[in-house]
Image (cartoon, grey):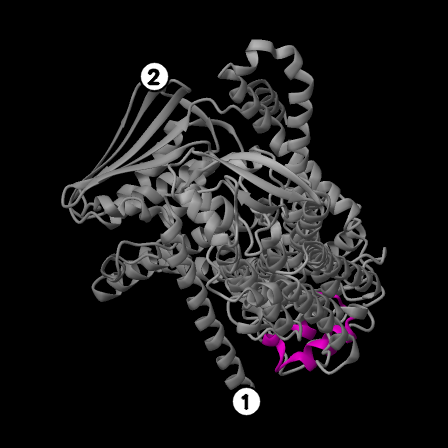
Amino acid sequence: MGDRTWQRRLLFLLTGLAVLLLIGQNVLSIGRWLNEPFPGFFVHENLTVGPYSVPGWTGQTAGLQPLDRVLSINGRDLRSRADLYQSARSVPAASSLHYRVLRNSETLDLTISTMNFSLRDWLLSFGIYIFIGLAFLLIGVSPYFFHASSPAALPLCFMVLTVFVWFQTTFDFMTEGVLPKELRIFALSLTPSAAIHLALLLRQGNLTSLSLRSIPLISIYGISVVLGILNSATFFGPLEYWIAFFRAAYVYACIGALTFLMVTGYALRRTDSDLERSRLRVMFVGALLGFFIPTLITVLTSSFQWPIPYNIALVPTIFFPISVAYALLKYSLFDLGRVLKVALSRVALMTLLVVIYAIIAFVVAPWAGSYAKDPLVPIFFSVFVVAVFNPLLRWLENVVDRYLYRQDYDPIKVQEEISMFLRTLDAAPSLAKGFIQRITELLGIKNAVLMYRGKNATEILGSATETMAQTAPGIDEPMGFAEIWSGSDYRGISRDEVKTNPRFREKRDLLLEVFARWQAELLMPLVYEREVRGLVSFGAKKSGHEYSAEDFRLLGTLTEQLALSLENGRLYEESIAARTRAEDSNKRLIEMDRIKKDFVANVCHELRTPVSTIIGYSEVLRDLDLSGDARKFLDRLVHNGQELSSLMDNLMDFSRMETHGSSAQIEIVKLKEILTGLETMTQRLIRERPIEFGIHMESAIDSIESDGQKLQQILVQLLTNALKFTEKGRIDLSICKRRTGIGEFLEIAVADTGIGIKREDQEIIFDDFRQLDGSSTRHYGGTGLGLGLCKKLAAALGGEIRVTSEVGVGSVFSLLLPVKSPAFDVEKYSSDQENSLSL
């Protein structure tokens, strides 16, 4: 490893020095030629015209062709190239010079004007060579610099180095000749051999090593050396021989490009690896655009005199190193597929636009007449291009997907259908099973396996197609989900990528075992909150076609949604389970509450008889002529017994209403009868206490439609409360009618001058078993049940209870009841009363 590192560093050091020297020499040469007169063309050192020209140069305009030999200038024979350039510089620009040239054994006389060599002329002629050569080198050495695993990285590095030298020495080769001409000649002849060497590494679809001592390589590079020697030896010899070898060098370059295409195409047909197939496709397209077409143009120009400038023809060559370097550095199957799709669709789009433009120009121009120079014409073409650009591009991308990758589904429809399914709220197992079923059917995938571990979950959710359901294994430790995707790169991976990508070197065997056991071609992560929680494996397609970049994009998008849906499904399951547990617990609580209330009612019922007996005997004893403490004890016994009896009645009523609800027996209630009983009860409870009691009722009020028993129970509770919390003062019971927008109501108010209630406590006193504080319980007694029971009874009667109070002043409890109950049938009630009287 140390030796290889040393060699690598030495190679880059020497390459860097060569680059600096060649670029520096070019900069010096350019400085001596810019803004100086030149003949309007350039010649080789053997006085043959070079194929480097720009439209508008006077040499091409006057009819001069590449490889014509210049014999004389203004009647004076030329002995060297320097004489030609010096003659052009000795006269002002645009001066006419007369040349005699030799073309195919024929002598021609041409008059050519001199020109001023501007920066634009340099950029369009030789500057293109320099910049493309530099880009060639920087791009081509990147696989070797970044330690690409392919053995093709070094031949590619050598090839781009020869191209760089070829391109960088072109300007010097055509102008001053400071550098040896053999430097450019051998760089040109070695380029196709390096390309063939690179192509041979692709045989049988595998990038394998090829020894430099092998006979094929010796023969290939031998051809380059022979061509270079012959080209150099005949450079100043007979013109026919040199031209033959000159053309042979370009033909050999074209043969090298064609060989590269043929070997790449052969490997493309033979390989079974999706990754290698995508790599070879990218290389094939790049070689076609950037290698074969430019070399073919040079052959057509040099051999058949096609008027295509070399410098313009060599611009597409940049596609070749880009495609090969990208294919060698990229290990993701789908990055390569995306690049290939973009390249093919954009090239096809440009071609179509040019064809459309040409058709319009040729068809419309004859009828346009003077309108052809109208400034609106460019605007029309611009609008036309904008209108057709996006539709054409989408159509071409669909064509690439359909015919290159055999895509037989609509990705937009598939994404919409599965996304719609994933948005449904369902349990995680159902979502996983539905996703696997739909994705395999719509994309034609043989098998798929899904594994997911939810947040804070200990068990793994698994789902698979029927063919894998019984045999799909789990992830073995220590190969967990997160270990497969390290860092922040959560892209899917393919089987072929694992085989070649250096980042999988340490865990390659474990990953390949997972691929083999799951019969998988792709592994897509399930990421939630920047953490890999699971994965989905996809097997081969039923059609036998490989996965495309569009497949990868679609599966990546859907698995991102799937991770969120599974987590939501897991939370949904937990919420359903929690709700079920809460419902079961609530049912148990309700049952326990019912049992408790039945128990309280039963206890109260059982206590009623002994308590009534105690009260009865106590009252009998109290009627005897007793005095002193005995009388006092009996009064207390009767009083407490009555309170205990009232408490039991309240508890029984409360339990009955809680368990069975409250239903009112509506009848016509005579208010005076109820008030008479209430007055008697109140006066008995007041006895000798300093409290006055009064009843105030409007004379127009006589009766009400209500439940008399419940009404009396409410009023007894309100009066009892008023007596309990009033030490002295007055208690008033008032009855009046009130009219509202919804009917006529009866207001029965119990007012006292007791301790009063704070404003913030006036709502809570109606809660069950609720008192203001512990001090009132200790001082006044009670359970806090009375007012809550009153509120329930009032609601059963269709009314409500309100309270107004001020601390230290007193309280007013108002009972509002409808005078006429909507559920009461007066005629039926009258009939029932008559029947009861007759009985």
Q: Which residue is under mark 2?
A: 700
Would residue 717 appear left or right of 328 to someone viewing this image? left
**Dot 1: within a 10 Å radius of its alpha carbon, few (fewer than 14), some, or many (20 or more) residues?**
few
The residue nearer to you, when weighing 194 against 25, is 25
State yes or no: residue 333 in magenta: no
Q: Is residue 77 visible?
A: yes
Q: Locate the C terminus by quadrant.
A: top right
Residue type at mark 2 is Ala
Q: Which residue is under mark 1?
A: 3
Q: Earlier in the sequence, mark 1 or mark 2?
A: 1
The residue nearer to you, when weighing 372 against 274, is 372
The prevailing secondary structure element of the residues shown in magenta is helix
The outermost residue toward the bottom is 2
Q: State the CA–CA distance, disc 1 to disc 2.
A: 121 Å
- Helix, strand or loop under label 1: helix
The segment highlighted magenta reads 498-522
Above or below residue 673? Residue 560 is: below
Image x and y of residue 281, in percent = 72, 57
